[in-house]
Amino acid sequence: MLRVLAVDDEVPALEELAYLLRQDDRIEHVTTAADGVTALQDMVQMIGGGERLDGVFLDIRMPGLDGLDLARLVGGFPSPPRLVFVTAHEECAVQAFELEAVDYLLKPVRAERLSEAVRRLEAATSPAPEPGQDDVIPVELGGRTRFVPQQAVWFAEAKGDYVRLHTVDGSYLVRMSLAALERRWSDAGFIRIHRSTLVSGRHVSELRFEGGRVTLTVGTETLQVSRRHSRQVREQLVRQHRGVIS
């Protein structure tokens, strides 16, 4: 169960956000603050008093101490809470993820989108897996079974009722849907870039914008990102690599 702080200088927006958070069974407690200074004081008091604070749902444009400045101060805490930005300004997304934000929501906040942010917050605050753990996909190859580790996969392509896994050693056909593989590997940094393509964020070396087209380099391959997925892909890659990809 998560304990969170919601921060917004617009009272109706703050009340709505707090209401939606309290409807989520994964949220144990919600505290609210109407400005950055009050939020900082509340956090210092809570954390200093030994109270657990898992996440902060944070507006950006606020008078006085704005959300980005507050996030920078929070980053200096010994064990900082994770950050979810909730804002009407989409141009600050890269800065937000450079500050290691878990998610970036645009107002007006939809309940289903907030639920996804809570899922990401919950995953970010869960204990890290033991070193060496890696999902493995068994592949049948003419009477032999090849075990393909998740970390070796560059990207996966939908092929009817099958998925083709591309690795440095070759490609392998597996009988499963791309949607099932996405659910299985979403927490491992795999990103949907097209309705038929799922890529491993750890193997992406470049994201390029040219003539209205978005492509990325994964392994030795160049793949096209659909217009529908381009913004989400950029945000997820920035979040994974904690830097600006251009």
Image (cartoon, rainbow, N blue to C red):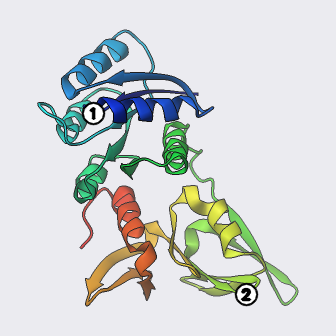
For the point 48% across and 46% down, which residue is it?
Answer: 117
Contact flag, marks 2 and 1 (Cβ < 8 Å): no
Quadrant in which the N terminus is drawn: top right
Res 80 seen here: no
Q: Is residue 120 above or below residue 201?
A: above
Q: Is residue 78 above or below residue 213?
A: above
Quadrant in which the C terminus is drawn: bottom left
For the point 63% across and 32% down, which residue is it?
Answer: 25
In screen coordinates, is 243 left or right of 140?
A: left
Mark 2 residue element: loop
> Dot 1: few (<14), some (14–19), or many (≥20) neighbours within 10 Å?
few
Type of amino acid under label 2: Gly
For the point 54% across and 39% down, which residue is it?
Answer: 122
In screen coordinates, is 97 left or right of 185?
A: left
For the point 43% across and 47% down, which residue is it?
Answer: 109
The front one of 208 and 6 is 6
The front one of 39 and 143 is 39
Label disc, if present, on residue 160 of the rendered structure: 2
Residue on which the image places disc 1: 10
